[in-house]
Image: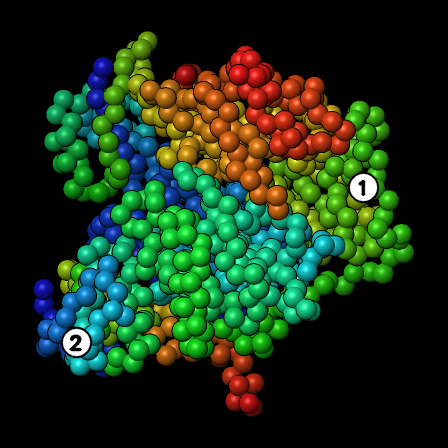
């Protein structure tokens, strides 16, 4: 993975120094809250319901063991012993003290970590595919390009006061494991006549007005991709709406101009900015690529691809076999596997990990995964390069730390935002709803198969409810919590937006409604159909009837 | 129904409640404020406590119970972590 | 308001702007800007960042005079203003000179090319390779 040189380190250190100065000016009264707040937000520090929350960046979701260990140390020393991995591959701490925040950032800087631009109206963390560098279907590893974007976007002088936040995602395959088309800019690596380039999507997003991003450029040569992003951002900075916070994302601009006109403006701006020397030279691309070269894989004799482990619909077979069948994916190198670590043990808080768990995972990464661990946008973790022969040892350790649940992409693998238990923006609690749904569905989740349930506590949609096969949206209905039910969303390459099914429910009602949806699915599905496929085939009517008791036809 | 003055301590972020003489970490030490807007304006000047707000609360069994669920969770702690919440308070 | 803060030698602090352009205006639509000595770009509110684009565009078109940032600005925007091509700042609340100087000196490198001519990190990293070309 990328390693800082003196330039990267100097910039992160300077940023800590700058923040420390801003904080001391604030505490001395030389800077009022109105002017300090945007500065602390630029370093990811929010005032939430109970305390300050810090969002630490995990660039494109990639961590070393030492970095994961530092995240555990931060949890112990500066927080209450745990952290929350987010739907943007970052980590959040909920109980940070402002007076300690500069020291915390300084600690992070010693392991090449920071909280730069994890909040505010600027370019946020670049997200990517958690299987990068390990997946067999990769056209090219997206992470060097994500690193180039990280550097280009950090402290960008023209784009630090945008109309609103800006999220970019880079993937390296047709398979979309990162919800790429639901980002402000989505970049997909492709080849055309052997040449590497990007398919460029602009204007995706969830929240109040969800959109699937349209393609605005079918093929962009890699040599021009930074200047092209510069052009997109300049058009957005100049013409994005600033009159209404709910209409300020680039998706609104693309929608209001229309993709064709938006594209025309970007192409015109690009024709100009690409002459300004913005694109990094080939030498820099190669330098960064060098950090992502394949680790020293052993040459292991194995049939390739390996035979799939049997996936049974009963709980026969040992726990280990069940875990392998569910959590372990095929690696591009014979003899190796991709290991998914569920952070959704039934009964626990989705996406949370204790300091002890983080430290144990750091050790697993160092011993068994070439010192690498990844964070997924589904709030889980990945050990990308594990030898098949090491799987029993890895699993045994996960059992010991309580993270051996075998539920990847199953019904109890629920995504939930922090919700009203933590977040000032929330209208309703999301974690308890997620927990109750998981508990209800877990006994039959093997039978249900792939089912992505996503719960958001407010319209901002940090739980990605628009991308859920089943989405739950918490709202405030006359001062009480109310939950809307949505169906048919997907953040994969078959991207679609979930549609609302009918009137909302209270907490118990929404859990029961989700249960009825799964019963309907089981009674209507044909062989091999996922829940999402069944919904797309039969439509909302049978589900609506089951949940609301209406006639199916009429 | 009463109004309580609340905010967050600048240095630490802790939720604070106006006691009449100063600030407390516990809602049960809060007092109903009479001229809330004037008090808020006065306390806002020092900026030692940020995000000042007046919230509605009722007395129930000798304790303060904010009217809105958000304010109850803010006062008592996350509903999903008993170890990080105030014991004996029902946020529902 | 006092004398504008000078970011660099192009500042003409004793002159008023020949024109003040609002953030909603298109600098490319303005005629005859080349004749001006001081162009003001307004910041009615610090969070409205459109003028950063306007300043850069003016520099890209070759304007060599004083581009002055006018409005709701603090020392915390100074580095961005400088890199975007501004040469002076007339802030609603005067800037503390010592804090301003420290802010401008704090970041020893830059990652990306902008209007100030600073070499991006990748240019420094491959200077030898570039020199060899």
Q: Position of residue A394 (x, y in %)?
A: 75, 43
Q: Nearer the viewer, mark 2 or mark 1?
A: 2
Task: Find the residue positioned furthest to the bottom.
Answer: C132
Q: Position of residue B91 (x, y in %)?
A: 40, 19
Name the quadrant of the N terminus of chain C. bottom left
The numbered disc on residue C38 is 2
Q: What chain is tagged by disc 2?
A: C
Which structural element holds mark 2? strand
Q: Are marks 2 and 1 on the same chain?
A: no
- Judging depth in this view, the residue of A524 and A479 nearest the camera is A524
Q: Chain of mark 1?
A: A
Instruction: State the CA–CA distance, disc 2 to disc 1.
Output: 71 Å
In the displayed structure image, the side of residue A269 where residue A471 appears, left or right: right
Question: Does residue B38 lie above or below A164 as drawn?
Answer: above
Which residue is located at x 46 percent, y 69 percent?
A227
Q: Quadrant of residue A410?
A: top right
Residue A435, image quadrant: top right
* Left or right of C13 on screen, residue B7: right
Q: Give the x, y percent position of residue A93.
A: 47, 42
- Name the image colouring: rainbow
Pointer 1 residue? A392
Asked if residue C80 shows in the view, the reply is yes
Q: Position of residue A376 (x, y in %)?
A: 60, 45
Q: Looking at this rendering, what residue extends furthest in the top direction?
A: B61
The residue positioned 56% from the left and 36% from the top of the image is A489
Q: Which mark is residue C47?
A: none
Question: Is A274 on the left or on the right of C96, as rendered?
Answer: right
The reply, left or right, for residue A341 in relation to residue C42 is right
């Amino acid at each position: 993975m990328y390693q800082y040189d003196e330039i990267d380190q100097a910039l992160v250190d300077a940023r800590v120094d700058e923040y420390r100065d801003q904080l001391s000016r604030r505490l001395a009264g030389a800077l009022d809250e109105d002017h300090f707040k945007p500065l602390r937000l630029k370093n990811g520090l929010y005032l939430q319901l109970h305390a300050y929350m810090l969002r630490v960046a995990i660039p494109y979701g990639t961590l070393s063991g030492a970095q994961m260990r530092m995240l555990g140390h931060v949890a112990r020393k500066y927080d209450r012993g745990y952290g929350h991995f987010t739907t943007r591959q970052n980590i959040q701490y909920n109980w940070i003290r402002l007076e300690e925040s500069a020291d915390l950032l300084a600690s992070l800087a010693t392991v090449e970590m920071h909280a730069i631009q994890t909040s505010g109206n600027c370019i946020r963390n670049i997200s990517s595919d958690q299987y990068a560098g390990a997946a067999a279907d990769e056209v090219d590893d997206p992470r060097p390009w994500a690193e180039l974007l990280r550097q280009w976007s950090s402290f960008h002088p023209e784009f630090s006061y945008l109309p609103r936040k800006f999220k970019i995602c880079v993937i390296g395959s047709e398979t979309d494991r990162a919800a790429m088309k639901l980002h402000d800019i989505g970049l997909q690596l492709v080849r055309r006549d052997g040449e590497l380039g990007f398919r460029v999507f602009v204007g995706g997003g969830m929240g109040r007005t969800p959109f699937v991003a349209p393609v605005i450029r079918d093929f962009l040569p890699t040599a021009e991709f930074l200047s092209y992003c510069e052009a997109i951002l300049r058009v957005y900075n100049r013409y994005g709406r600033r009159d209404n916070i709910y209409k300020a994302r680039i998706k609104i601009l693309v929608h209001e101009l229309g993709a064709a006109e938006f594209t025309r403006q970007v192409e015109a701006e690009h024709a100009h900015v690409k002459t300004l020397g913005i694109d990094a030279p080939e030498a820099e691309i190669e330098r960064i690529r060098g950090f992502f070269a394949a680790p020293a894989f052993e040459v292991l004799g194995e049939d390739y691809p390996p035979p799939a482990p049997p996936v049974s619909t009963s709980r026969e077979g040992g726990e280990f076999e069940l875990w392998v069948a569910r959590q372990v994916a095929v690696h591009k190198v014979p003899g190796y596997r991709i290991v998914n670590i569920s952070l959704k043990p039934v009964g626990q808080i989705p996406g949370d990990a204790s300091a002890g768990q983080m430290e144990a995972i750091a050790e697993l990464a160092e011993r068994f995964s070439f010192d690498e661990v990844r964070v997924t946008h589904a709030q889980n973790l990945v050990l990308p390069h594990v030898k098949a022969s090491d799987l029993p040892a890895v699993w045994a350790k996960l059992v010991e730390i309580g993270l051996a649940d075998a539920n990847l992409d199953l019904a109890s693998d629920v995504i939930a935002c922090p919700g009203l238990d933590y977040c000032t923006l929330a209208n309703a609690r999301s974690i308890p709803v997620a927990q109750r749904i998981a508990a209800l569905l877990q006994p039959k989740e093997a039978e249900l198969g792939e089912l992505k349930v996503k719960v958001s506590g407010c319209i901002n949609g940090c739980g990605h409810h628009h991308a859920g096969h089943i989405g739950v949206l918490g709202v405030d209905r006359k001062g009480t919590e109310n939950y809307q039910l949505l169906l048919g969303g997907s953040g994969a390459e078959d991207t679609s937006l979930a549609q609302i099914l009918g009137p909302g429910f209270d907490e118990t009602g929404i859990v029961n409604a989700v249960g009825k949806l799964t019963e309907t699915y089981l009674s209507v599905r044909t062989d091999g159909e996922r829940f999402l496929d069944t919904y797309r085939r039969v439509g909302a009517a049978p589900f609506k009837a089951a949940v609301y008791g209406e006639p199916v036809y009429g | 129904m009463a109004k309580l003055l609340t905010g967050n301590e600048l240095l630490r972020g802790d939720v604070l409640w106006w006691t009449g003489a100063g600030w407390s970490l516990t809602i049960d030490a809060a007092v109903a404020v009479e001229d809330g807007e004037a008090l808020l304006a006065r306390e806002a000047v020092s900026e030692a406590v940020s995000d000042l707000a007046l919230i509605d609360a009722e007395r129930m069994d000798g304790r303060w119970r904010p009217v809105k669920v958000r304010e109850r969770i803010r006062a008592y702690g996350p509903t999903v972590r008993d170890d990080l919440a105030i014991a004996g308070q029902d946020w529902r | 308001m006092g004398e504008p803060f000078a970011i660099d030698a192009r500042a003409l602090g004793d002159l008023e702007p020949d024109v003040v352009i609002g953030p909603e205006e298109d600098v490319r639509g303005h005629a005859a800007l080349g004749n001006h000595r001081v162009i003001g770009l307004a910041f009615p509110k610090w969070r409205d960042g459109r003028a950063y684009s306007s300043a850069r565009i003016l520099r890209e078109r070759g304007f060599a005079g004083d581009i002055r940032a006018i409005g709701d600005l603090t020392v915390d925007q100074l580095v961005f203003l400088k890199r975007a091509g501004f040469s002076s700042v007339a802030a609603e609340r005067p800037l503390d000179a010592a804090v301003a100087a420290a802010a401008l000196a704090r970041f020893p490198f830059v990652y990306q090319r902008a209007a100030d001519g600073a070499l991006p990190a990748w240019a420094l990293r491959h200077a030898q390779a570039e020199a060899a070309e």
